[in-house]
Image (cartoon, helix red, strand yellow):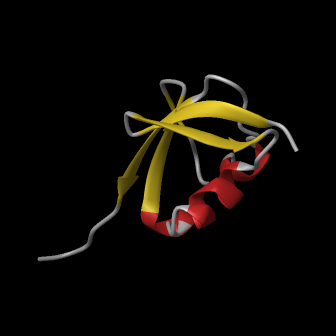
Amino acid sequence: MSQISITANGQSLKVAAQTALPSFLESQQLQRDRVVVEYNGHAVTPQAIDKILLQEGDVLEIVRIVAGG
């Protein structure tokens, strides 16, 4: 299987070509309902996460949601 290069939170990573964003988040031990994702400079709605397949050169910024008082 071929691999592509992406950047996630400033770190260069190799992932399988056509990796779905939810699968990538899971591989990073991140729960999709506990993060906010920016994909190539655009905020991703929770509904759109399922539609994204990672491509060569994509840039992700992933922020964990932390609740507290």
Residue at (58% x, 32% y) in the render: 6
Residue at (75% x, 49% y) in the render: 20
The one of 47 and 29 positioned closer to us in this rendering: 29
Percent x, y for residue 36? 44, 51
Left or right of 38? Residue 22 is right
Percent x, y for residue 62? 42, 47
* Up-down relation of residue 32 to residue 24 (above or below): below
The one of 17 and 45 positioned closer to us in this rendering: 17
Q: In this view of the protein, can residue 47 be seen by the observer?
A: no
Left or right of 9? Residue 40 is right
* Up-down relation of residue 28 to residue 42 (above or below): below
Q: Residue furthest left?
A: 69
Percent x, y for residue 59? 52, 29
Q: Residue furthest bottom?
A: 69
Q: Quadrant of the C terminus?
A: bottom left
The one of 60 and 6 positioned closer to us in this rendering: 6
Percent x, y for residue 32? 56, 64
